[in-house]
Image (spheres, rainbow, N blue to C red):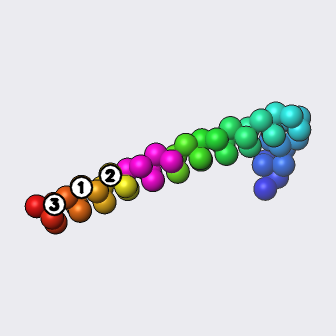
Amino acid sequence: MRIESEMVSRFNRQAISEMNSIEATLSQELDFFFDNVMDTVVDFFKEEVTV
């Protein structure tokens, strides 16, 4: 915990908020990607069942 506190103290608040927004954007992109993958997999199996 002490190391984390020291690391955080080295960054200013603007840099921390920028890093958080980048993480949020990456998280949203990954969610979108995996939602699309799951939709594709479900569609594939629906087609396999009907054929």
Q: Are marks 2 and 1 in contact (CB under 8 Å)?
A: yes
Image quadrant in which you'd find residue 51: bottom left
Residue 23 location (% of width, % of height):
66, 43
Name the side, left or right, on which 32 lies relative to 2.
left
Which residue is nearer to you in this view: 47 or 9?
Answer: 47
**Gap in angstroms between the C-alphas marked 3 and 1:** 6 Å
Residue under the point 23% across and 62% down: 46
Amino acid on which disc 1 is placed? Phe
Residue under the point 31% across and 60% down: 42
Residue 16 lies in the magenta stretch: no
Above or below, 49 against 4 in this view is: below
**Gap in angstroms between the C-alphas marked 2 and 3:** 12 Å
Above or below, 36 against 15 in this view is: below
Q: Which residue is mark 2?
A: 40
Secondary structure of residue under mark 2: helix
**Magenta-colored segment: predominant secondary structure:** helix
Residue 45 location (% of width, % of height):
23, 61
Q: Which mark is residue 48?
A: 3
Q: Which residue is mark 1?
A: 44
Secondary structure of residue under mark 3: helix
Residue 44 location (% of width, % of height):
24, 55
Give the magenta range.
Answer: 32-37
Residue 35 lies in the magenta stretch: yes
Amino acid on which disc 2 is placed? Thr
Q: Are marks 2 and 3 in contact (CB under 8 Å)?
A: no
Secondary structure of residue under mark 1: helix
**Residue placed furthest toward the front:** 50
Residue under the point 45% across and 53% down: 35
Q: Residues within 10 Å of mark 1 (few under 14, many from 20)?
A: few
Q: Are marks 3 and 1 in contact (CB under 8 Å)?
A: yes
